Image (tube, grey):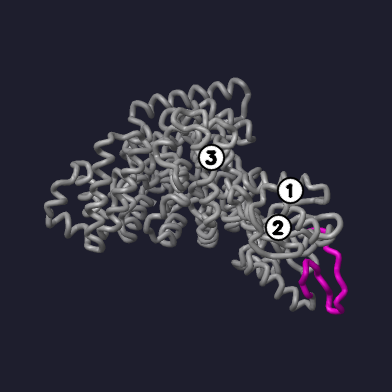
């Protein structure tokens, strides 16, 4: 690691400490250390620390500890801990120009604002202005900062982009000449992060006239490009909107075109040409040039001899050829899920009791809940001591007994999200791990390992017969933290070989593994578990996005562990333990 990168790590620690209302002297120490170390530019930080230059010796004690950590391991335990302790939405807010850590902390503490979208709503409805040391001017600055962030073309998480799109679409549907208006583009394809909003409107009268009328709305700041029936608009809040207005009979073709990636549209167009069709101006024409009525996207694919391609799969990654051969898989859907296996409770860092989480899962139609609080090494997330585990298991036994008495067909499984330690060992000893119905193993520390070290660490963990699921395998936080270096192909291959499921963590900030790795898992025969990583009953909402990403990655129900019954999941977890115990 060079000194420039080390300085960035120190500066990030300072920001996160301030976000957590950390000791001011420590914050200033980190800031000073960042400036000092940055002065050494591209030099290897190990050389600087080993040389113990006078300015390094003079550093704040905590900063010096961090610097030594960075020199020894190319990572920082303090930075990793702060990143894990900080809600991802707060870290996203740090990207807003002019919004500092202190104000983010205040909005979080007083208004329970956890996301950029919630911050914007609080600024709009007056709640932010009412906070101490805020006021109307500050709230306006926050709105301007969010607008400026959007105006730069910055990406946002899918669920925030979807919420923006719904709000804009609802407003435009109120236009008297708009008959139907649909959201398209990367949002409809369930891209993990999105940059703009694509809308397609079927209108009465002239599409160009209606498009021009919509461009005159009060919330439109400027017209960026286009003309006639298709326009690119910049709204007052910075959101970019690509709008296409068409005649009603063109809607299906226009929606298809605006939804697919450029590569998907090109591949379908070429396929159509081979059959003698042409596709232009949102019309399909036969060899004689006669327009063919297309009532729906499904009818379009059928006309071209293609199986239906769901919107999320239209990326140009082989789906057109598969649709032509009739081999495109029927993807998993949320209703296929029978349980959720990655959920937290108040025992660690969750916000609800085990029973509250169970009844929330039950209300969503699930048949079992896998409680998987953090293990003892994960102290910053309230990792459970052995005594607390014993207490939790007794509560789960009592709850299951009560469900049975009530005639409720629901079961709570005893799980744990055990840290994969830097040495590759799974937290707790083998005898204690035997207490759990299933074990999720996750990396929560030492993200700075190189690819060989991290890969070997996880490969070793996969040798533990207690490990059932590998949690969020790349450690990424979208728009916040890059994936750690790891040979994911090697991990997926071994997981399939030894009988460990790979998690698709459905938290919108993670979506880890991504859809491309889902394809890899399916091709390798490795089971995938769609985990909501729910820390409250609302966290089960993550399952909808998780299954959409799984479909995007061509996963069928047979590829997903939690489409199985509770007994089948227990059998999956037990199989490795039995084999290890019998020497098989």
Crowding at dot 2, Cα within 10 Å, few <14 / some 14-19 / many 20+, comes out as: many
Crowding at dot 3, Cα within 10 Å, few <14 / some 14-19 / many 20+, comes out as: some
Task: Determine which quarter of the picture holds residue 270.
Answer: bottom right
Disc 1 or 2, which lies upstream in sequence? 1
Would residue 288 be counted in the magenta stretch?
Answer: yes
Q: Secondary structure at mark 2?
A: strand
Nearest to viewer (mark 1 / mark 3): 3
What residue is pinned by disc 1? 172
Residue 134, x across and y down, in percent: 47, 32
Disc 3 or 2, which lies upstream in sequence? 3
Would residue 11 be counted in the magenta stretch?
Answer: no
Q: Nearer the viewer, residue 268 or 280?
A: 280
What residue is pinned by disc 3? 140
Q: Nearer the viewer, residue 416 or 94?
A: 94
Magenta-tinted stretch: 278-296
What residue is pinned by disc 2? 243
């Amino acid at each position: 690691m060079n000194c420039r990168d080390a300085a960035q790590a120190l500066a990030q620690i300072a920001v996160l400490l301030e976000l957590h209302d950390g000791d001011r002297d420590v914050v200033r120490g980190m800031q000073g250390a960042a400036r000092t170390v940055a002065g050494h530019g591209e030099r290897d930080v190990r050389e600087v620390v080993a040389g113990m230059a006078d300015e390094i010796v003079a550093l704040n004690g905590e900063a010096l500890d961090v610097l030594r950590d960075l020199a020894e391991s190319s990572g920082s335990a303090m930075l990793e801990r702060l990143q894990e302790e900080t809600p991802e939405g707060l870290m996203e807010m740090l990207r807003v120009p002019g919004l500092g850590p202190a104000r983010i902390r205040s909005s979080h503490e007083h208004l329970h604002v956890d996301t950029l979208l919630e911050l914007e709503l609080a600024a709009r409805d007056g709640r932010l202005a009412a906070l101490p040391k805020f006021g109307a001017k500050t709230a306006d600055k926050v709105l301007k900062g969010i607008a400026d962030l959007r105006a730069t073309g910055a990406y946002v998480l899918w669920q925030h982009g979807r919420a923006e799109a719904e709000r804009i679409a609802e407003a435009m549907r109120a236009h008297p000449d708009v008959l139907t208006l649909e959201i398209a583009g990367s949002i409809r394809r369930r891209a993990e992060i999105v940059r703009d909003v694509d809308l397609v409107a079927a209108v009465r009268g002239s599409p160009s006239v209606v498009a021009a009328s919509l461009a005159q709305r009060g919330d439109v700041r400027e017209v960026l490009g286009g003309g006639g029936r298709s326009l690119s608009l910049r709204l007052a809040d910075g959101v970019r909107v690509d709008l296409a207005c068409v005649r009603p009979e063109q809607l299906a073709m226009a929606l298809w075109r605006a939804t697919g990636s450029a590569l998907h549209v090109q591949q379908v167009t070429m396929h159509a040409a081979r059959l003698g069709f042409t596709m232009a101006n949102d019309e399909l024409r036969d060899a004689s040039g006669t327009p063919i009525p297309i009532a729906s996207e499904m009818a379009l694919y059928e006309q071209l001899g293609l199986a239906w391609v769901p919107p999320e799969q239209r990326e140009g990654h082989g789906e057109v050829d598969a649709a032509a051969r009739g081999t495109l898989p029927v993807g998993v859907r949320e209703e296929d899920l029978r349980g959720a296996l990655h959920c937290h409770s108040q025992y660690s860092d969750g916000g609800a009791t085990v029973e509250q989480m169970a009844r929330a899962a039950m209300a969503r139609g699930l048949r079992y809940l896998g409680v998987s609080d953090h293990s003892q090494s994960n102290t910053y997330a309230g990792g459970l001591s052995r005594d607390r585990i014993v207490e939790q298991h007794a509560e789960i036994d009592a709850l299951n007994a009560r469900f049975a008495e009530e005639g409720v067909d629901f079961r709570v499984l005893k799980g744990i999200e055990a840290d994969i330690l830097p040495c590759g060992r799974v937290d707790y000893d083998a005898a204690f791990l035997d207490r759990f119905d299933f074990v999720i193993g996750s990396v929560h520390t030492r993200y700075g390992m190189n690819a060989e070290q991290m890969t070997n660490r996880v490969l070793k963990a996969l040798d533990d017969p207690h490990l059932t699921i590998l949690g969020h395998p790349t450690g990424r936080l979208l728009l916040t933290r890059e994936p750690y270096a790891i040979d994911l192909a090697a991990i997926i291959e071994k997981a399939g070989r030894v009988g460990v499921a790979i998690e698709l963590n459905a938290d919108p900030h993670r979506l880890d593994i991504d859809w491309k790795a889902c394809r890899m898992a399916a091709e390798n025969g490795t089971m995938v578990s769609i985990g909501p990583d729910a820390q409250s009953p609302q966290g089960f909402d993550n399952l909808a996005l998780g299954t959409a990403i799984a479909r995007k990655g061509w996963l069928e129900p047979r590829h997903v562990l939690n489409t199985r019954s509770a007994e089948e999941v227990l059998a999956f977890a037990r199989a490795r333990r039995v084999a290890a115990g019998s020497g098989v």
